[in-house]
Image (spheres, rainbow, N blue to C red):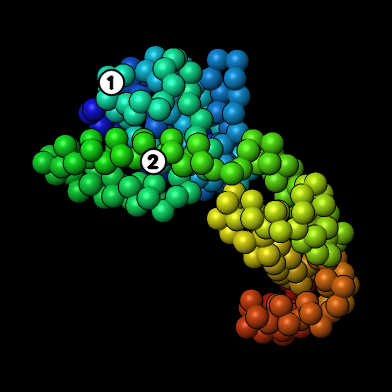
Amino acid sequence: MKPGLHGTGRYLAGAAIGPARWPHYDLIVVMEGSLTLVSGSKTAELFTHDAVLIPPGVSFQGTTGKEGSGIWVQHFSASRKELPRAFPPGRKPVLLGLAASSEVAGALLRRLHQLHSSGRRGNRLLRAALLAALLRELYHAARHSRLRSGETSRLRIVTEWVERHLEQVKTLRAVARQADLSESHFRNVFRKWRTQSAGAWLRDLRMTEARRLLLSTNMPTKAISARIGFGDPVAFSRCFRRVHGIPPGQFRRSHPLPV
């Protein structure tokens, strides 16, 4: 196994990846954001911690999602015998859902990047060994992930719905119902999907919208509280203070609307 070009990059929303057709393997890991990958007649949606292995000679191209994407890429040459036996043979991309979410995969990704960045020629054998270990870990993690494609699709749809209907979202239980999941199961699969708790995600959405309304409108804080899904203005003020260090009224006074 011979590791070749390696790189990481942060792409803006709607950025094009490819089109490309390499004479070697291409391992792509989505570190943050999302990526739509097209190969032949197949289209796949990749999200944070998803990976894909593209065999030599396979054409592909991608487009980053609306939030952009951070991508880790490793080109390498290898015989079929050098690949982990678990990988299916063939000339199609191998999708590895949530494979890079394991601690082992994360450590291997970081170490490979450090070795490549060091530029020392003597680390080639070590890079090859670590890359082989990473491929085995990615396949193992993907096989044992409890998330299925149907669940990730539902999570993606429901998060987009919440962003458009934040005023209707009073509790996480209501969000879970939109995904047709119990609240406990929703919390569990959400953390696996986004590596963030569902509660923190909902709080961040609410606070982002609260800041926007405080800075761009004269809407009373009570009305803002209702708009972002808080039934109790006191609870809204308490949450805002916990996140920003000051209550919403003081935040607005320190950022007056332009005349």
Query: Is residue 67 something one can see in this rendering?
Result: yes
* Callout 1 amino acid: Lys
In the displayed structure, 133 sits above or below 201; it is above
Q: Pick whichever, 66 or 155, lies toward us.
A: 155
* Callout 2 amino acid: Glu
Q: Residue at x 37, y 50 (%)?
A: 104
In the displayed structure, 238 sits above or below 141; it is below
Q: Residue at x 59, y 20 (%)?
A: 42
Q: Pick whichever, 8 or 40, lies toward us.
A: 40
Say which quarter of the image contains residue 220.
bottom right
Category of crowding for the residue at label 1, using alpha-carbon neighbours closer than 10 angstroms: few (below 14), some (14–19), many (at least 20): few
Q: Give the distance between the C-alpha atoms of the residues marked 2 and 1, in whole angstroms.
A: 17 Å
Q: Is residue 243 left or right of residue 178?
A: left
Numbered tag placed on residue 81 in the rendering = 1
Task: Tell me the SS state at disc 1.
Answer: helix
Query: Is residue 71 something one can see in this rendering?
Result: no
The residue that mark 2 highlights is 137
Residue 48, position in %: x, y?
54, 46
Q: Pick whichever, 51 or 247, lies toward us.
A: 51
Q: Residue at x 23, y 35 (%)?
A: 128
Q: Pick whichever, 189 or 203, lies toward us.
A: 189
In the displayed structure, 11 sits above or below 222; it is above
Residue 213, position in %: x, y?
78, 67
Residue 126, position in %: x, y?
19, 41
